[in-house]
Amino acid sequence: VNSSRRNFVKGIGFLSPWMVGFALFTAVPAGMSLYYSFCDYSILQPPLFRGMENYREMTHDAVFWKTLVNTFEYAAMALPLGLVASLGVALLLNRGIRGLGIYRTMVFLPSLVPLAASAMIWLWIFNGQYGLLNAILRPMLRMGIVRSIVGAQNPPTWLASTTWAMPALVLMSLWGIGYTVVIFLAALQDVPVELYEAAELDGAGPARRIWHVTLPSISPVIFFNLIMGIIGTMQVFAIPYIMTQGGPAQSTYFLAMYTFDSAFNFMRMGYASALAWVQLVIVLLLTTIAFVGGNRLVHYRTR
Amino acid sequence: LKLARIILLNLLVWPAVGIVLWGPRAQTAPVDNRIVVDYWEKWTGDEAIQMQTIVDSFNQTVGAQKGIYVRFVSTSNINQKVLVAAAAGVPPDIAGMTGAELASFAAQGALEPLDDLAAEPGHRITADLYKKVYWDGCHFDRHLYALVSTPMSLALIYHRELFQQNGAALRAAGLDPNRAPATIAELDAYSRALTVTDPDGTIVRTGYLPTDEIGWFPTQISLWFGGKVWDDKTKKVTLTDPGVVRAYEWVASYSKRLGVENVERFASGEGTFDSPANPFMTGSIAMVKQGPWISNFIEHLKPEMTHLLWSRQEELTKPPQDRKQNYAWAAAPFPSAVPGMNDVTYCGFDTLVIPKGARHKEAAFEFIAYVNRQDVMERLCKLHCKNSPLANVSDDFLNNHPNPYIDVFEKLARSPNASGPVQIPISGQMTNELNALFDEVSKLEVEPRVGLQAAQERLQADYDHYLDIQRARTAQ
């Protein structure tokens, strides 16, 4: 008993820096923001309690609804695309081809580029006039067939266009799939070889092996990446903040950006806190739905 | 293994202890027992270096006499940093903010009113020392909250050489290539005559493009159409004012004529203002609306457009009017759409303020007053290539200014039709709304009047909400 008690104290001792940090910099501020969400608080004057006022205001705040819709739109495009792309890349990288290490490094490398730097690179790639992407698309559109299928003479102006700015940001989000790919790769290598062998004996081709063996085996990891993806895409902030500042015409103005602007540019920390709590509730709801729906589809291996 | 652990531990612990005890320290106070005034400034790069020279000369002269040492920190995102520092009770003694944000900070009680300090016998800083637009702009709710650090006025900058080269086209359109357009209708005519497009609509060159000035343009654009976005007497947002509507309709007219996608493509190909690919400097835009600093940028980024006849040294020996021939560009008042309303301009400015809770108010004001001394102000404004906010301007300032057209900017700043930033507590929201609306209008996604009406309702609600809160606070 004595030694387990000593171990406990030791454990707490080692954990305490984190616990103090968490309490001071996360738990207390989160609690305060919940209180502020019921106040009018400009940061510069003491908070003024207003009850549900901020939440009521949100219901008829056109900018809030616009940013909410934008955020959902982004998540609906970026999340599935990111999952499929990273799983696809992981499957390719999981094969025994030559120079695999190099390919794996190449896929992961973009994730190491600082956000601001990659934003600058992509600003140029998406440049409507001189951008790399349009330099590739333009000659393609000159071909009669492509033009008649696409029905456009010129490639889009991407970040300058209200129609194309959002898809451009989604495309760019694929740049950072490195981490997800690494997690998928680890899971893929954990799939028991016996299962593949059994499937092969039963006459399953490559597609069926993926569908009936690989996917069920790594379903907990797919699920994990899905949850992380929901959280990540619902909080999208840095890239659009640097690249588009929410424009053109607020077509890439997201909830997290509106929260930031409300707090620091409009000096409405109370309203911003309310926005942040609504965002948390939305993420919680989506995660719960994913858990409930996912339970049937996720197979945890019993040991 | 134990030995290795001890060695490792020592290798880690001792350097850490050393850094804590003898490591680098923040810049400390100077030798003598002077009051240290902390001054945070939004300028970075050259502008910060130039301000540092003013701080240095203060520290060596007035500061040394009065026992004050100004510690200068150049920092980006100054509003957010001052906001957080003020909330934490440790604001800097002086903050260099832009004039447009004055009201939102003052309305929250975040700034120290400067009326009493300015009126002190030692300073006597009064309205008659300033050009009206800047003095008024430093006020909110009848109190002085700031003094100017450097100001600006906006003018039409046109490519004189390009005008000459396209003289035939301009003359064919009944226009004079030797002068700037004098009305908005003329500006449009010049613009059309100077525009070159490919058969597929791709814009190669345009005379003018309203969307080129996005960023700070949306809230000011209506001034040249006689429209105001805010009525300070009735405290109403007035975006449906006929002048404002006309201004936004004018913006839309360019997109209608040139094609939205063509404009987008042209605009995305443009380089940024401070790069050699700046479209005015590459000659792909013939006319822009800009402040006096453009002269500095052209000098550095496109020297071919300057010193056509003489070297800089030689040029400064010539009479002021002759100096202008030395440049491929020229400046004139940006034309107005209202007959008889001349010399319309927007006068923004940078300010020095004392945040509430600053520890050394008097000492801080000594420095602010120093910067506003005529000789110091003229030195700083020449370094930054801006006009002066002061009523009196020396001949030396006008004759030896890096911008040969400084007289145009000075005249505009004195004009009765010069307007400063809209001083309302919801300036952040207004900029946000109008930026978005400007985009929508220029992309022809909304009828100007409809968009303005909707934005007006939202902004008025924001302002009324602000009033509600103020009332609730006073009732408490």
Image (tube, coloured by chain):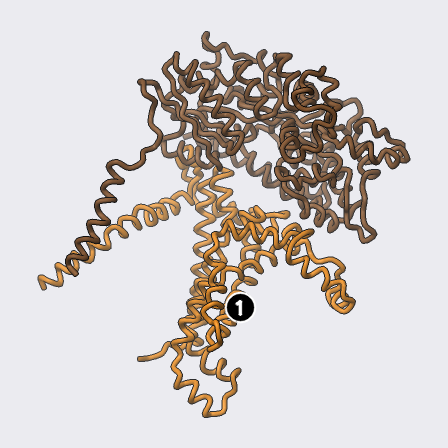
Classify 10 Å Cα crowding around label 1: few (below 14), some (14-19), many (20 and above).
some
Q: Can residue B188 be seen?
A: yes
Name the tint of chain A in the rendering: orange
**Closer to the camera, B379 or B300?**
B300
The x and y percentages for residue A277 are 43, 51
Outermost residue, top side: B121
- Secondary element under disc 1, as helix, strand or loop, is helix
User: Which quarter of the rendering shows the C terminus of chain A?
Assistant: bottom left
Name the tint of chain B in the rendering: brown
Task: Answer left or right for A144 relative to B117.
Answer: right
The residue depicted at 67 percent of the width and 39 percent of the height is: B278
Q: Can residue B139 be seen?
A: no
Outermost residue, left side: A2
User: Which quarter of the rendering shows the N terminus of chain A?
Assistant: bottom left
Total tally of numbered discs in the picture: 1
Task: Answer left or right for A222 relative to B347.
Answer: left
Provide the residue designation for mark 1: A85
**Closer to the camera, B402 or A4?**
B402
The residue depicted at 17 percent of the width and 54 percent of the height is: B6
Amino acid carrying mark 1 in the image: Ala
The x and y percentages for residue A114 are 47, 52
Residue B53 vs B271, above or below: the answer is: above
The x and y percentages for residue A187 are 40, 73
**Closer to the camera, B437 or B368?**
B368
The x and y percentages for residue A180 are 45, 65
The residue depicted at 84 percent of the width and 30 percent of the height is: B177
Residue A122 vs B407, above or below: the answer is: below
- Image mark 1: chain: A
